[in-house]
Image (cartoon, grey):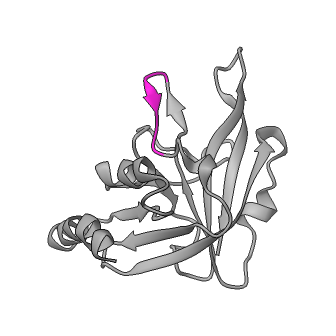
Amino acid sequence: QGLFDALVGPFVAFFRQHGSWALLMLLTISLYRLPDFVMGPMANPFYADLGIAKDGTMQVPADFSRAGWLTVAPAPGQRGPAVIAGHVDSHRGPAVFYRLRELVPGDEVQVVQRDGDVVTFTVRSSLDFAKNRFPTDLVYGPAPGPVLRLITCSGEVDPVSGHYVDNTVVFAS
């Protein structure tokens, strides 16, 4: 707990002082097992607001070092699926969710909100889906309580589009 407070405290104080919307997700998956994954999101604490694109899909963050919260979905801790998405990598190297695939059932994900409240989720599963067969209802559909969905790209890269053909979705509650 002391290490968590030492790492998070300055960011929470910044959010309170500046009053801007920010959602800092700290993946406190064992600080010893995935130290880079914990530090990655904290290096750039502001999260993008994501909406729905014209084609009906979820927007993705424009900045590869930032994750984004789907604002038409519940906020973390509210009833239903809170959705946070981030890129796995870019042409320059790893991005904010590069190590998302390493999360396993039982790992904890803590979302620190701008008011300093911490919402803790436990990873239940991590599944890969083809983008052209994405299970929209499973990911975005109603849930009986607060749940979290973390989404990034995965699989092979399509040589024509240059985009990954799959998504990894981490389910946590």
Q: Quadrant of the N terminus?
A: bottom left
Q: How many numbered marks appear? A: 0
Q: Is residue 141 left or right of residue 94?
A: right
Q: Which residues are magenta?
A: 91-96
Give yes or no for residue 86 being in the magenta stretch: no
Indicate whether 25 appears above or below 86.
below
Residue sitting at 79 percent across and 64 percent down? Answer: 138
Give yes or no for residue 95 being in the magenta stretch: yes
Q: Is residue 52 left or right of residue 56?
A: left
Res 44 visible: no
Indicate whether 145 appears above or below 75.
below
Residue sitting at 62 percent across and 82 percent down? Answer: 79
Residue sitting at 66 percent across and 58 percent down? Answer: 170
| Residue that protrudes farthest toward the front in the picture | 32
- Is 49 in front, or is 149? 149
Residue 81 is situated, as x and y percent measured from the top left of the image, at 64, 71
| Residue that protrudes farthest toward the right in the picture | 133
Res 169 visible: yes
Q: Quadrant of the C terminus?
A: bottom right
Q: Is residue 171 left or right of residue 75?
A: right
Indicate whether 120 appears above or below 90.
below
Residue 13 is situated, as x and y percent measured from the top left of the image, at 18, 71
**Helix, strand or loop: magenta stretch:** loop
Q: To which quarter of the image does residue 9 belong? A: bottom left
Residue 21 is situated, as x and y percent measured from the top left of the image, at 32, 65
Residue 54 is situated, as x and y percent measured from the top left of the image, at 63, 43
Residue sitting at 45 percent across and 44 percent down? Answer: 96
